Amino acid sequence: MIRWRCWGLATMLCASMAFADEKGFTLREVEVKARPFLDAATVGKVPGKAAVTVTERQGGWARIRVGATDGWVRLLTVRLGNPDPAKNDTALLATLGVGKQRSASGATATTGVRGFSEEDLTAAKPDPGQLARMDGFAVARATAAGFAAAGKLSAQSIPYVTSDGRIEKGGK
């Protein structure tokens, strides 16, 4: 057990070092946030294909620095390397498929999410307050259909799950 924890710590340290001060570019115009949260204050905007320095990574977020702007953007809005593949100093590693899986187009953006440990899952308990909060988001079938029609969305036939967990047959 201790050996696995040490291995996990070493892996996290190596992963964080791999992202320390790496050059990259934005894939599109992005808002830079003060903290790695969608509702955090916006501290600036960066145009697409702008050269950035990735200084840190946290979950699905990357901390970037470009000029006087320093803040957080969604990880999938940044690609490491150079926007010009001919000048990309990571092209050799990408060609060898090291560090990422390759798609038919030759590049794949991925992000990791921390999971639950076995202890977390074993100790998990239901939270009736959160369940009640989730129930507050439920809408009646007629309300959902009206919302879809107002948004000019096409109907899809899917089963409707009732509040007691039963699936109604033939729901729309």
Image: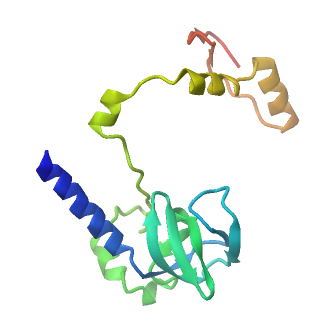
| Residue 61 appears in the rendering | yes
Q: Which residue is drawn at 36% across and 63% down?
A: 102
Quarter that holds the C terminus: top right
Q: Is residue 53 left or right of residue 122?
A: right
Front-most of residues 90 and 130: 130
Residue, far right: 150
Q: In this view, does 157 lie to the left or right of 106?
A: right
**Whole-percent x and y of residue 100?**
34, 64
Could you say which quadrant of the image residue 80 lies in? bottom left
Q: Which residue is drawn at 61% across and 18% down?
A: 159
Q: In this view, does 97 lie to the left or right of 71?
A: left
Q: How many labels were placed on the picture?
A: 0
Q: In this view, does 23 lie above or below 61?
A: below
Q: Residue at x 45, y 77 (%)?
A: 55
Could you say which quadrant of the image residue 10 lies in? bottom left
Could you say which quadrant of the image residue 110 lies in? bottom left
| Residue 105 appears in the rendering | no
**Whole-percent x and y of residue 133?**
65, 27
**Whole-percent x and y of residue 16?**
35, 69
Q: Which residue is drawn at 61% across and 88% down?
A: 67
Front-most of residues 105 and 30: 30
Report the colour scheme: rainbow
Front-most of residues 28 and 152: 28
Quarter that holds the N terminus: top left
